[in-house]
Amino acid sequence: MALAICVAGASGGADKDDTSSPQPFAAQGHARVVREVFANKCSQCHAPASKNKHAKKHWKDWHDLKQLKINYVLENGAMPDTPQDTMLWQIITSDDEEIHMPPKKAKKGQLSEDEFETIRQWLQAGAPTGYQ
């Protein structure tokens, strides 16, 4: 998966705690890339066909960013002020092994710096679902 194209203009490795101004963000293209990140890194354990008994939430469709946004991004129906304020960001950056996703032992590995940056930009842009 070529994530470098989704963070064009970003310099070097992303600091996962840096929520400064995002690079220009195209909702349709980046929503597609964000869906690919979640499908690649999360669906193995959180898909309905998964036999993972420890996964607290299973998604019918990893392409459904709208449902992901409702459950893990919005707070009382509104976008939080910064990506750091979203439950999703807190989960993927947590130091607590009970909370952090993907887990350290995940077969697909941890999120790359490009994937963190893609998710940060997506959140900073209001977590567009790619649908109008």
Image (tube, rainbow, N blue to C red):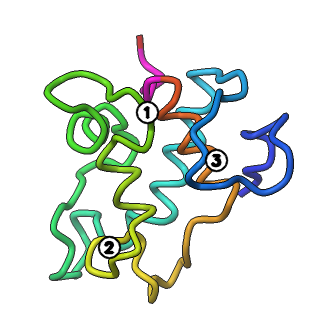
Task: Classify residue 80 as left or right of residue 77.
Answer: right
Label 3 or label 1, whichever lies nearer to me, is: 1
Viewer-proximal residue, 101 or 55?
Answer: 101
In three-dimensional space, the C-alpha distance between marks 2 and 1, rounded to whole angstroms, equals 28 Å
Of marks 3 and 1, which one's residue comes earlier in the chain? 1
In percent of width and height, residue 79 lies at 32, 25
46 in relation to 17, above or below: below
User: Which image quadrant for residue 5?
Assistant: top right
> To which residue does mark 3 refer?
117
Of marks 2 and 1, which one's residue comes earlier in the chain? 2
> To which residue does mark 2 refer?
45
Tag 1: residue type? Thr
Magenta extent: 126-131
Label 2 or label 3, whichever lies nearer to me, is: 3
130 in relation to 33, above or below: above
Viewer-proximal residue, 52 or 4?
Answer: 4
Tag 3: residue type? Glu
> To which residue does mark 1 refer?
82
Q: Residue at x 38, y 27 (%)?
A: 81
Tag 2: residue type? Cys
In percent of width and height, residue 17 lies at 56, 52
Q: Secondary structure at mark 3?
A: helix
